[in-house]
Structure formats: structure tokens, C-alpha cells
Amino acid sequence: TRTVTKNAGGRVFASYHVYKGKAALSMEPCMPTFTKVESGNFIMDRRGSIMLTFAPAVGERKYDWTRKQLFALSATEIGSLISLGPRDSCEFFHDPGMLSSTAGQVRKSLAIKAHTDGNGYFFSLNVVNKPQNTNDYLSVPFTTGEFSVMKTACSFALPSLLGWDRVTNPNLGVGSVFQPKKIDREALSLEWER
Amino acid sequence: TRTVTKNAGGRVFASYHVYKGKAALSMEPCMPTFTKVESGNFIMDRRGSIMLTFAPAVGERKYDWTRKQLFALSATEIGSLISLGPRDSCEFFHDPGMLSSTAGQVRKSLAIKAHTDGNGYFFSLNVVNKPQNTNDYLSVPFTTGEFSVMKTACSFALPSLLGWDRVTNPNLGVGSVFQPKKIDREALSLEWER
Amino acid sequence: TRTVTKNAGGRVFASYHVYKGKAALSMEPCMPTFTKVESGNFIMDRRGSIMLTFAPAVGERKYDWTRKQLFALSATEIGSLISLGPRDSCEFFHDPGMLSSTAGQVRKSLAIKAHTDGNGYFFSLNVVNKPQNTNDYLSVPFTTGEFSVMKTACSFALPSLLGWDRVTNPNLGVGSVFQPKKIDREALSLEWER
Amino acid sequence: TRTVTKNAGGRVFASYHVYKGKAALSMEPCMPTFTKVESGNFIMDRRGSIMLTFAPAVGERKYDWTRKQLFALSATEIGSLISLGPRDSCEFFHDPGMLSSTAGQVRKSLAIKAHTDGNGYFFSLNVVNKPQNTNDYLSVPFTTGEFSVMKTACSFALPSLLGWDRVTNPNLGVGSVFQPKKIDREALSLEWER
């Protein structure tokens, strides 16, 4: 059977999910945005990212996505991640309020730590929110296979996040690239203003 | 000479085959499927896979494809496979009837084992079918070169199986992606309901 | 300045050349061919290859391309090549007349040997033509950088040679893929009938 | 929110920037150019490159791009760069006036040196301009993550710089590939005539 659905500029949503006992982690590319300049050309004005979304488990194979925590991996952070050796670890710190009056109020840290036997990694997000007096910790173990999927998918997406796929193939167009929805946009801005 | 054949939405079939003395192994990507949601966007509803098809040899360079056995590699299994070192092995277990009344009746296991000299791998599929009282074992040795082709091809296909190529390039469309034929679809479902 | 040339199905030719003191080596992908089957779909009928063309030097930076020798790397041979370690070597043998009445008359062997210091490889082609009583030997040293270009370009091309880029993106079409010119076609057939 | 801007052949500009204390480094692909030949086909006449642009810091997070220095990485130099091990180094020499009457007047050397701890690299450009009696030295340290981004982006771009993406997908067209602007073109010519 065949489905011929017209895709008139429709955006496609596709996340890679890893579901584990205490939390789930979903990841998805957020494309860069472009500005039209004179002469009909385009300049990238904001690099893309890989948005990680963590949700706590609230039962067997049930996750509470209303309590999700976001962490947007920048190109350089993706570079660190995809070059991790089987015993390596790395940690990234984000302050969503950086350079604003809310600097220091919310602190996020993402640690990616190799299992001691070299067979996989832990992705652990810690979010300390001073105004709300909360401290969330969400940790998802990745097998070697799951980490390999993430590495391959992130390596694939990286040139697009830098806009280089549009440089080598202008036919791709920038008009069909949607900006994140208003709410995601804000989350992203918070992350990025640093 | 030139062939200008109009490809009006036609699907393309292309398998990578490895023919050996006791059996042959064919592999081919099965694309994900998408559902149209409000506002004209699309959400991936079923990840793609790499379908492996084994057939026993029945003579010199002759294979009996009517006695084929299927094994659909998931994204995570592909991740394991493409990160195998030259002396590594892995094994995957599928129960086509999982979570249904036929659970446990058919058991498939795929073992990928490095040759002891590090020059290649064995792909060995064992299918135990209790209702039919059959036990099929099909094994195909891969040279280093053949395994490298498989790794490169699977790494290439993986982002498509996750739908990420459609995220970075919405022009690709989802309407031109066909669902597997009815019969393959069923086979797939059996594999995936677990 | 901008060139807006309509590319109405025009084929693009682009070789990667390495010019050295005694010989030059040019390489270029030869795309697979497809057959239209019922229902408007396509099946790949012949895998693509990477065509290597060697030419002897006949002066400083001058090469005699009329004395060229061809060697078409199959997908599996490309797999071997891209998985070579810095001290590894491999050798491929082709008999253009294999399975025909001219079997054994022309023998080609391509050796890829790591430099003893691990900094590069020799690509050496030996063609023994019994009917013509000739024995040609053409050898081109590759630096690490040149070999890395070849590896990256061949890894990029490999999924296309298997037809998998058309499976994941049917929009690519097969009608815009040209068959090699008559003469190359014949050379290819000779190489492949084995 | 969504921006539907028509991209009627518009060129896309997207650089990957690394900003450090003493200098900044920007990199961007320069696509190859093609010539139309009889029968409507195209031949690549000039390989693409990755253009590196260095600018000195003139204050905190301020860079003087009017004092930029360019270095166009060839395909083979990119090959060397992407195959560097964590403790390796390499150096490239360009003479923009090579093979012309201005040979030897300007000498550029780019050194890529691993940090002694294996955690990153220095990109250091030295430009000696005899007629102007200047000697510029610009150095930008790359973290492991930044180098990994560069490697991934350059590996992605390399097949395009060789024109192989147009060989495997003639739909891409060459008419939508713009030649570098006049001034960049000249800079490139100077670099390449050697």
C-alpha cells in the first residue's frame, strides 16, 4: 500500500527516544535560521542545535513529559560528544539567564559519563532553579548501541546545524526551514544568550 | 547511451547481497512511516529498519529464496553493529509474537561474531519455530571488506531510519516514501511488537 | 558574478586526480543502473563502481592518457580500501575475460601498500596482456592527505553505488542517472563478468 | 511562527566561527566551478576549497576583520587535517604569487599543532609580505569539541568540493552554484596558481 500525501512545505518532526527505568531522553535537531540580505542571498543568523528533552518516569514505561527539562546542545558541545572515547566523560554548563538580570537563578549541567566497564554512558541532567527552590536530577543510561545511534545521528545533523548543507546545495532553500515554535524559541533564547 | 525514464514517484529497490557457500544474506533499508497532523506537519510514527534476508544455498551459487528467513535490525541494533571492533561480537533476540498470544512460539537470534583472526565476521541466524517444529540455522561469513560496506551503508541509512533527513530537508517529503508491501508490513509488525 | 546555466538533465563529470612523478591516477564514481519493473518501480540491476584510471608520465607533469589502464573498484573492494589501517595492505585481481572464451588472456592486479613509515600508500597496477605480449606497471604514491581524500570520497559515494540513496530519497530519480558511455560500458562489463 | 521566504536561486552564506582571546577564525566552503561542454554535460574545472579567515582581536570579543588574512585549504590539505590524530601536527605552505612574476613576495604558512596534553590544537597562520615589509602571526586555539566540529563539517563538504555530489545527484545542478565574488575569486586564484 502507498500513501501519497502532499507535503506542501509541511515540517517533519522526528525524535530519537531512549526510554529507561528512571527517565527518558528524547533528542531532535533544531535547524538554524537565516536572514535574507540584499541581492536575494541569505546569511545564517543563528546556528542550529540538538534539543535534548528529559522526562522522569512515573511508573513502568510511563513518563511525565509535563515535568520535562530541556538542554540544547550547541555545535561545539555536539563536537565534544561525538569525539568521546569509550572511557571518556564530559560536562556542559548552561545558564539560561546569562547576560540578563536573571543570571545565576537557574543552572543546568549535563554530564556524559562512560560506564566503568566502557559499555555505554550515563546522560545526567541537573537543573537547580533558585527562584522555585527546586533541584531536579534526571539520568538515562545509554548502551553502546544507543550511544552509537546518537553519535551517528548528531554527526549527520551537524553540517545542517552550521548551515553548510545549504551552502553546498542552495536548492534546499531556507524558506522551508521553520523557526521553532514560539515557546521553544524562548527556551532556546534563554539557553543561547550566553 | 542515455535512459530518460520518468520516475513519477516510483519506488527504488536496491539490496546489498553477500553470497557464500552455505547461504546468502541480502540487506535493504525499510523507511519509517509518518502521520500527518494538524497544520500540515508530519510526525514519524514508526522508525525504519534494515531488513536482513537469509536464504540457504541449494547448489553452487543457487539459493532457495522461498525458504528465506527475515530479521529486521532496529536503529539501536544497527548502532551496536556499526560500533563493533574487529574482535567484538554481539547477539540480538527477536520474538515476533511478543506481547501477543503467540509469544514464545517463534524465537529468532542473530549473532554477529568476529573471526578469530580479526579478518571479518559471521552473521548467523537461528530461527526456532515451535508450532512448525523447525530449527533453521543460516550462517554467512563476511570479509572485512563486506563488513565495511555494510557498516558504511548502515551508517548512511541510519539518519533516514530515524526521520532526521526529513527534519533537515523537508523538501524530501514523506508522500514519496512508501510503506512496505502488505506482507512485509506484517512481518515487520511481528518483529516490532516487543 | 553568477552563472545561471540550466542543467536540464546534464551529466556532471568530476574526477579526483593525483599526479606524481611516474604516473597519474584519476578516480570517479560510475553510478549503478536501474530497470523499470511493473507498477512504475525500479530495481537496481548493476551496482556502481569507482573507476580508477592510471596514465604513465611522459615528461615533467605530462601524462599519456592514450596509454591509460582502467580498474573498476567494486563495492566490496571499496569496503576493503576504506577500512585499511595505516600499516595495512590489500590486493585485488581482475580478469576482464572471466567466464568467457578470453579468460586468462588479460590479468590485472591492483596492490595498495602502506609506506613502511605509515605515512601514505602506493597504488600499483600491473596489467599483463598475453595476446599483446605487454606487461604494464603503473605506480602512484599517495600521501596520508591524498589517501584520506580518497577514503572520504569513496565512503560518500558507496551508498550511491549500492542504490541506497535512491531508496531513502526516491525524488532523486533514476532517469537522471546516465549509463556510462558505450566504450566505458564495455570496459566495465569485461571487468564485472566474474 | 513560520517564515516562507522564496529562495529563488539565492546563495546561502554560513561560516563556522571560533572566537578566542587573540584572534578569531572563520571557515566556509567555496564550491567548485563547472564548465558546460557539448551535449549539455558539465565538467568541473576548478575544485572547491575551505576558506579560512583569520582576524586579530582588538579588545574583549572584538575583532578587526579589515586586517583579515585568508588561507584556502585544498582538498588534499583537508584530507590531512581530518586524518590528524590527537597528538599529530601538520603544516601547509602557500605562495599566492607562485608561477608568476610575484613568486616569493608573499609567503603564508598554516601550522596545525596538537596541544601537548592532546586536548585540542592550535591553528596558527604566519603571513610574511616582503613588499609591504609585514609579518603577521595569528593563532587560534581549538578545543577538542571545536576541532571535532571542523573535522565533521570538512568531511561533509569534501565530496562537494570534488564535485562528487553532483555526479551522484545531477538534480543538484551546477547553475545554482555561484562563483565566489570577484574579490574572493582573485584571492583564490592567487592561492591556487601553484
Image (cartoon, coloured by chain):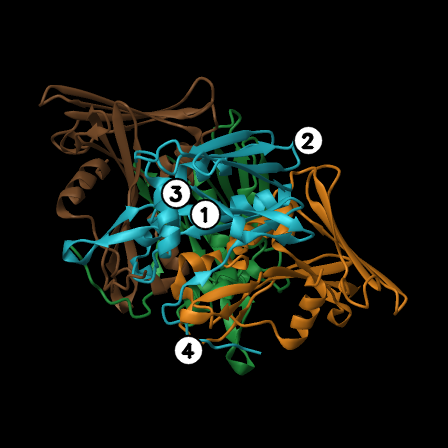
Chain colours: A cyan, B orange, C green, D brown
Q: Which mark is residue B6?
A: 4
Q: Nearer the viewer, mark 3 or mark 1?
A: 1
Q: Crowdedness of circle 4 by 10 Å Cα count: few (<14), some, many (20+)?
A: few
Given contact means CB atoms under 8 Å apart, are the residues at marks 1 and 4 in contact? no
The residue to which callout 3 is attached is D153
Q: Are marks 2 and 3 on the same chain?
A: no
Whole-angstrom CA distance, mark 2 to mark 1, is 28 Å
- Horizontal side, residue C47 vs residue C181: left or right: right
Note whether B14 is above or below C80 in the view shown: below
Residue C30 visible within the image: no
Residue D192 visible within the image: yes
Q: Residue furthest front?
A: A132
Picture residue at 81% right of the left edge, 67% below the top:
B102
Whole-angstrom CA distance, mark 2 to mark 4, is 54 Å
Q: Crowdedness of circle 1 by 10 Å Cα count: few (<14), some, many (20+)?
A: some
Q: Which mark is residue A117?
A: 2
* Residue A60 x, y percent position in the rendering: 69, 52
Q: Nearer the viewer, mark 2 or mark 3?
A: 2
Judging from the image, mark 3 belongs to the subunit labelled: D
Judging from the image, mark 2 belongs to the subunit labelled: A
The three-letter code of the residue at mark 4 reads: Lys
Q: Nearer the viewer, mark 2 or mark 1?
A: 1
Given contact means CB atoms under 8 Å apart, are the residues at marks 3 and 1 in contact? no
Mark positioned earlier in the residue sequence (2 or 1): 1
**Kind of element beneath mark 2:** loop
* Residue A16 x, y percent position in the rendering: 54, 53
Q: Crowdedness of circle 3 by 10 Å Cα count: few (<14), some, many (20+)?
A: many
* Residue D108 x, y percent position in the rendering: 23, 26
Q: Nearer the viewer, mark 1 or mark 4?
A: 1
The residue to which callout 1 is attached is A51
Decide which of C42, B51 is in the foreground and name it: B51
Note whether C72 is above or below C182 in the view shown: above
